[in-house]
Amino acid sequence: MSDEPRPRKTLSLKPGVVVTRPLGPEPLAPLRPARPSRPPRAQKPPPPPPQVFGWKCKPCGQGFDPPTDAPEDQDVRCPSCNARVGKVGDFAMDPPPNRLRARRVKTDL
C-alpha cells in the first residue's frame, strides 16, 4: 500500500445545472457602504508666545506693566479688574511697600 490516502469520490451535479457562484451560504453584505476617506485635517497654527509682564495684580492675578512715563503720584489700576494696585512711584521702590496690591513676576533667567 502507498502512504497517500485514497481520493474521495466527487459527486456529480444534476444535468442542466449551471454553477454561477461557488456553493455555500450567501456572502454577507457589508455593514456600512464604502465611502471615500476624508481629507486630512489642516494643521492648527502654533499657540502665540506667552506675554511677559513685570507685575501681577494680587486680587485677580492678571499680569500688567505699570506706566513708566506717568507722574509719581498717579494711581495704577489693574487692566482686568480695575482694582487700584498702587501709585506709579510705589513700583519704583525696592523693596516695594506693603500697601502695594501687586507682586513682581518671578523670572527664570
Image (cartoon, rainbow, N blue to C red):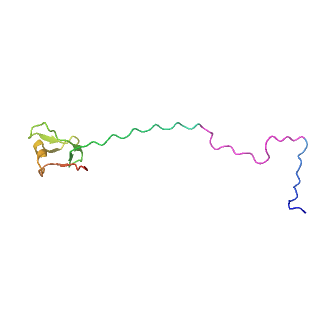
Please report the residue visible at 50 percent of the width from the left and 38 percent of the height from the top.
Answer: 40
Is 64 placed left or right of 7 in the picture? left
| Quadrant that contains the N terminus | bottom right
The quadrant in which residue 88 appears is top left
> Percent from the top left, x then y, of residue 81?
22, 43
> Percent from the top left, x then y, of residue 94?
12, 49
Is residue 28 covered in magenta? yes
Is 73 placed left or right of 37 in the picture? left
Residues in magenta, as a range? 16-35
Q: Is residue 48 above or below residue 11?
A: above
Q: Is residue 1 above or below residue 33?
A: below
> Percent from the top left, x then y, of residue 77?
17, 41
Is residue 48 covered in magenta? no
> Percent from the top left, x then y, of residue 60?
23, 47
Is 51 placed left or right of 69 in the picture? right
Please report the residue visible at 86 percent of the width from the left and 62 percent of the height from the top.
Answer: 3
Q: In the displayed image of the protein, which residue is found farthest to the bottom?
A: 1
Q: Is residue 60 above or below residue 40?
A: below
Please report the residue visible at 85 percent of the width from the left and 40 percent of the height from the top.
Answer: 18
The quadrant in which residue 19 appears is top right
Total marks placed = 0
Main SS category, magenta section = loop
Please report the residue visible at 12 percent of the width from the left and 45 percent of the height from the top.
Answer: 92
